[in-house]
Image (spheres, rainbow, N blue to C red):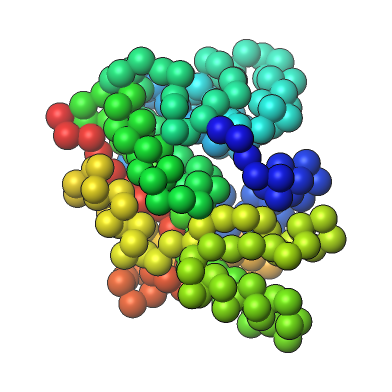
Amino acid sequence: MRLSDDITLHYAQGVERDRLTTWGRLEALRTRALLARFLPPAPAVVLDVGGAEGAYAFPLADEGYQVHLLDPVPGHVEAARAADRAGALASAEVGDARELPVEDASADAVLLLGPLYHLVEAADRARALAEAHRVLRPGGRLFAAAISRFASALDGLRAGVITDPQFEALVEEDLRTGIHRNPDVARRPEWFTLAYFHRPDDLLAEVRAVFPGAEVFAVEGPCGQSSMDLDLDDPVARETALRTIERLEREPSLLGASPHLLAVARKAA
């Protein structure tokens, strides 16, 4: 997969490296909770496609899963290999979600926790989903993440950046087309990079075209993606927040207010 120059530049800046342990910590906690709920038990084979430097791959490997990490960014794969001094990962390779270097029916779970929003064309997303279906064993699980169509608008309002004319134009384009284009990736990396933002119903339709019976869950829910919105260091506050988000995770009227969405599906046995 050849990434666009904007995507390559964005990740080369390292702005995503610690996101899931800082301001995106709530996203990580909720994603791990959903994985724990639906993953088959260890030592199942997990293919982490778009796994970056291993934010999810390493914890799953520590739990006894056989995790194969693939990512289109060579630097991500090099970093994952460097961090894997104990050999926890089954493999870490450069790979394309649309053409997985894996045999048919060889994985118990496939994680697409990034590819769907960096594949801007619908045909490419369909290919990635078809590839996930191909490599899954009967009964295997798919986890496919997406960014909500409304994420920039809500984040811009919350952070006050919506008053910037460039950001407002970006939001208008997001809402109209779903294609998110940062006008200046080099100087405004916090505005993310080239991506496709889904409406919840559109995500469900795309996944169900390949995996009938798929369901879509809110990740952070309507409280937003920033861990600063909640005291996640306080165990009582954290667990109460997670329980509350779980109660709202499939409420249709609130799904789009969650910055991230997660489609969960099972390949027919």
Horizontal side, residue 8 vs residue 59: left or right: right
- Observer able to see residue 150: no
260 lies above or below 67: below
**Observer-nearest of 26 and 264:** 264
Outermost residue toward the right? Answer: 187
Q: Position of residue 112 (x, y in %)?
A: 45, 40
Quarter of the rendering containing residue 98: top left
**Observer-nearest of 8 and 64:** 8
**Observer-nearest of 235 and 220:** 220
- Residue at 66% across, 56% down: 193
Looking at the rendered structure, the number of numbered marks drawn on it comes to 0
Quarter of the rendering containing residue 151: bottom right
Horizontal side, residue 209 vs residue 165: left or right: left
Horizontal side, residue 252 vs residue 196: left or right: left
- Observer able to see residue 140: yes
Q: Position of residue 181 (x, y in %)?
A: 64, 62
48 lies above or below 144: above
- Residue at 69% across, 63% down: 182
Q: Position of residue 25 (x, y in %)?
A: 63, 54
Horizontal side, residue 172 vs residue 204: left or right: right
Outermost residue toward the bottom? Answer: 163
Outermost residue toward the left? Answer: 269
- Residue at 36% across, 64% down: 200
Instruction: Give the position of the C terminus as an image quadrant.
Output: top left
162 lies above or below 39: below
Q: Position of residue 185 (x, y in %)?
A: 76, 57
- Residue at 56% across, 33% down: 1
